[in-house]
Image: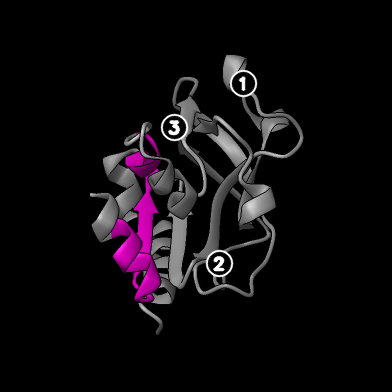
Amino acid sequence: DVKAGVALCLSGGGYAGIHAASAMEYEWAFYGEVGGAFFREHPAIQPALIHVETNAHPSTTTLPADWRRTDEWYSFRTNPRPNVTVLLTLDETSYSPGTSAMGTDHPIAWYHVYERARSFYTALGHSREAYTEAAFLAHITGGIEWVAGR
């Protein structure tokens, strides 16, 4: 509820969102602010190229500068970049985005501090196979550890 969410932020709690976490609570503005953006749509699952914007965050330290993988590529209702630090961007020239295109700046993972709460979100992780992929597991583990303050 709203009171619990606000209390979480004011007390310095945390939020780690993976994949479909951005595809819910559309009527709750607070949830969108904590998470960074709301899901809009996605094309068919397909391979694409991800660019790592920084290796300075625990969720990206082990990732290659360019990371090719297959996933369900989310687009968002708004670009979160003005309010977050983007970790990964999607190269829209490397796949067929269809109506889900966001243009030359397509964030796909990010972090920020909202009020006093640490927030990490990655749109990666649709398939069961993703959770056996070492690079993906390192990405989400690093994000969760950052949220936990480790």
Q: Residues within 10 Å of mark 2 (few under 14, many from 20)?
A: many
Image spot of residue 126 (x, y percent): 35, 38
According to the picture, the residue beneath numbered tag 3 turns out to be 72
Q: Is residue 113 above or below residue 70?
A: below
Q: Amino acid at mark 1?
A: Ser
Asked if the stretch drawn in magenta spans residue 16, the answer is: yes
Q: Whole-Å distance between the Cαs marked 1 and 2?
A: 25 Å
Q: Please tell me whether mark 1 sits on a helix, a strand or a loop.
A: loop
Mark 3 surroundings within 10 Å by alpha-carbon count, few (fewer than 14), some (14 through 19), many (20 or more): some
Which residue type does callout 2 highlight? Thr
Question: Marks 3 and 2, how far apart in space?
Answer: 20 Å
Question: Would residue 96 be found to the left or right of residue 133 on screen?
Answer: right
Residue 121: in sight, yes or no? yes
Name the quadrant containing residue 118. bottom left
Left-right relation of 25 to 124? left
Query: Sequence-wise, which precedes: disc 1 or disc 2?
Result: 2
Total marks in image: 3
Q: Does the magenta-highlighted stretch encompass residue 29?
A: no
- Kindly tell me whether residue 51 is visible in this rendering: no
Distance between mark 3 and mark 1 Cα atoms: 11 Å
Q: Residue at x 51, y 42 (%)?
A: 37
Q: In the rendered image, which residue does mark 1 sit on?
A: 96
Q: Tell me which numbered mark, 3 or 2, is placed earlier along the sequence.
A: 2
Q: How is the image coloured?
A: one colour
Instruction: Write down the region rendered in magenta.
Output: 5-23
Q: Position of residue 95 (x, y in %)?
A: 62, 27
Measured along the vertical axis of the image, is residue 121 above or below residue 21? below
